[in-house]
Amino acid sequence: MFEKVYITSNQMANFVCPKCGRSKRVDVSQYANLGRLVKVRVKCPCGYAYTSLLEKRKKYRRATNLEGSYIRIIDGKEMSRGLMTVTDLSATGMKLHINGRHEFEVGDPLKVEFHLDDTQRSHIRKLVIIRNIDRSKIGAELAPTEAVDKALGFYLFR
């Protein structure tokens, strides 16, 4: 298991030894702009060696498995609809797995609807913009008009 370490806005990362708890801030600017997952091998002064993953995302992402539906909107018209699964969720976006074939393009808006798996089964309805596509996996960002509602905020940080 790897420890995730978040890169701060000033390109620093705080590594904490899982054995002794000693921490060290390190300049990781050489890794910050790489377009791939970065594993870093760290050796603590206590002698313990471990591997950390550098996380470039600004917001915490929560792994999910939430069934829902989408509607693809182009020029104000409904073009297609279908079923999807929200596989991860953050305050600014989500990763979707689309069931079946689709004709999405980067920049397309989608209306997504799903229920959280919290005790209230909170209903979430959001407008998102597609930012990346990898076959049936879609990375989407909340549209600028969307806000994180109370239920989603509590869900992400519980």
Image: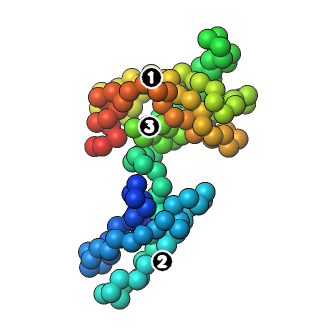
Q: Nearer the viewer, residue 146 or 19?
A: 146
CA distance separating discs 3 and 2: 30 Å
| Residue appearing at x 44%, y 37% in the figure | 92
| Residue appearing at x 29%, y 28% in the figure | 150
Q: Secondary structure at mark 3?
A: loop
CA distance separating discs 1 and 2: 41 Å
- Disc 3 marks which amino acid? Thr
Q: Dividing the picture into quarters, in which one does residue 2 lie?
A: bottom left
- Disc 1 marks which amino acid? Thr
Give how far across and how far down residue 6 sits, in percent. Answer: 40, 59
Question: Foreground mark, 1 or 2?
Answer: 1
* Left or right, 82 with reference to 54: right
The color scheme shown is rainbow
Determine contact: label 1, label 2, CB under 8 Å.
no
Give how far across and how far down residue 8 sits, in percent. Answer: 39, 57
Give how far across and how far down residue 133 sits, in percent. Answer: 66, 40
* Left or right, 150 with reference to 71: left
* Left or right, 133 with reference to 66: right
- Disc 2 marks which amino acid? Arg
| Residue appearing at x 49%, y 65% in the figure | 29
For this orientation, the residue located farthest to the front is 10
Q: What residue would you read off at disc 1? A: 145
Q: What residue would you read off at disc 2? A: 41
Q: Counting other residues with Cα less than 10 Å from the Cα at mark 1, is it few (<14), some (14-19), or many (20 or more)?
A: few
| Residue appearing at x 35%, y 83% in the figure | 44
**Residue 62 sits above or below residue 7 on the image:** above
CA distance separating discs 3 and 1: 12 Å
- The quarter in which the C terminus is drawn is top left
**Residue 36 sits above or below residue 125 on the image:** below
Q: What residue would you read off at disc 3? A: 92
* Left or right, 61 with reference to 78: left
Q: Counting other residues with Cα less than 10 Å from the Cα at mark 3, is it few (<14), some (14-19), or many (20 or more)?
A: some
